[in-house]
Image (spheres, helix red, strand yellow):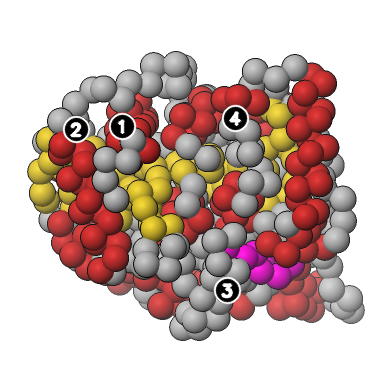
Amino acid sequence: MITLKEALKLNKDEIAELREDLKKKIEDKKEIGAYIEQLQDTNIAEFGEGIPIAIKDNIQVTGWNVTNASNILQGYVAPYNATVIDNMLAHGLAPFGRANCDEFAMGSSTESSFYGKTLNPHNHSCVPGGSSGGSAAAVAAGIAVAALGSDTGGSVRQPAAFCGCVGMKPTYGKVSRYGLASYSSSLDQIGPITQNVEDAAILYDIIAGHEKLDSTSANEAHEKVSDKLNCERKLTIAVIENYLEEADDEIKKVTKNAIKALEDAGHKIIYKNMANSKYDIAAYYVIAAAEASANFSRYDGVRYGNRADSTNLKEMYFKTRSEGFGEEVKRRILLGTFVLSSGYYDAYYIKAQKARHFIKSQFEEILSEADLILTPVTPTTAFEFGSKSDPLEMYLQDIYTISVNLAGLPAISLPIGVDSKNMPIGAQFIGQAYGEQVLFDGALSLENILNKGETV
Ligand code: GLN
């Protein structure tokens, strides 16, 4: 598939051709189910005439049936564009196709979508990761130039790693959340999923910037990174040793090769440890569930989408939510309501906020000595469908990604090799807040080194 950088050079007729060509390819790769339209056997949703970009089904596009892959939002039609969509349109890009995802972006496998599952293009019996699994599978299968996903605890980086593409989570506030369905408002960020690092920088530049309608948007002018990319600059990179040692053997091996290649290329490698990631998991699932339980009160059958037949208001709320939400979403709402209840607020929610503060300070300390942090993205490569039936096991997929959201930092995942079954392995760079330039420079440097075939 043509890259975003190349597509930006096409004229109007060539872009029209690209869109037609893409539609044919999508039809040919129907079984992957990267797009909700493939799963529903309907025509691909389009808006505008620009370079086609796949959009996760939780980002508002005027006139689209944006559903968060949930039954409760069937019939809802978005009345406005998210800021990222307006920014794309202003740069000659256009939303194209609704990418499948876990219901309300909760999950790590895209198995909880109301529409059915998306297959990993590298092995159809494995998950593409999640929650932005459709976005990553579309890019990896060559049926999207690039895609947008959302990352609350790793949902852009983890599926990118499982599918062998690049996924980037911006600093909290750099990309407006206006028009992104809120899951956990203090953690959510929209991010690009692309074929390479440069495309990620280009798409990030297009979607980033202040939005006055979004009080959590960083109030500063966006400085472009994609025209200043510099892979020659030598960086100090802190490898989180205990994270690396915990990962699967094959991930460990491939990551160590990448570290060696970085060192050989002149970067300085230092080794650090972070507190056991089980604290990140605990803090994240308390905070994310608490915020979700508050955010999801809006899905009541009155304002959006589906409404269950009922004889009175209370019954309508009850039935709409019982029938509309899937199992995982209900579990999170219950958990969130519990940790926010008056008797448990201090014991769980306040404690989780303290843990969050601690996690942030650990990052600050390491990043005062290093330009970037390097960790694995996931403890294993893509797993088989149905293999993680225990929710806690699924939550452990996020051990290397969620702390980044808790700290509000930018991070990128990029492919660094494959395991013995040929499944992609990714590495994650984490940068300082608003340090996207260094983050992309480091990632581009690693991508270039590996492409030259010096290692792995
Ligand atoms: N897997 C995590 C969760 O279920 C992360 C999801 C995300 O980043 N949207 O909450």
Q: Position of residue 315 (x, y in %)?
A: 79, 78
Q: Residue flagged by tag 4: what amino acid is it?
A: Leu
**30 horizontally vs 399: left or right:** right
Q: Residue flagged by tag 3: what amino acid is it?
A: Ser
Of residue 102 and residue 75, the one placed in the foreground of this image is 102
Read off the magenta span. Answer: 113-120
Q: Main secondary structure of the magenta part?
A: loop
The answer to whether the residue bearing label 1 lies less than 8 angstroms from the nearest atom of ligand 1 is: no
The answer to whether the residue bearing label 3 lies less than 8 angstroms from the nearest atom of ligand 1 is: no
Disc 1/disc 3 C-alpha distance (Å): 33 Å
Disc 1/disc 2 C-alpha distance (Å): 9 Å
Mark 4 or mark 2: which is in front?
Answer: 2
The residue that disc 3 covers is 125
Residue 93 in which image quadrant: top right
Residue neighbourhood size for the residue with mark 3, other residues' Cα within 10 Å, grouped as few (<14), some (14–19), many (≥20): some
Residue 445 shows which numbered tag?
1
The residue that disc 2 covers is 265
Residue occupying image coordinates x 63% and y 33%: 2
> Which numbered disc flags the more N-terminal residue, 1 or 3?
3
> Which numbered disc flags the more N-terminal residue, 3 or 4?
4
Q: Position of residue 312 (x, y in %)?
A: 85, 76
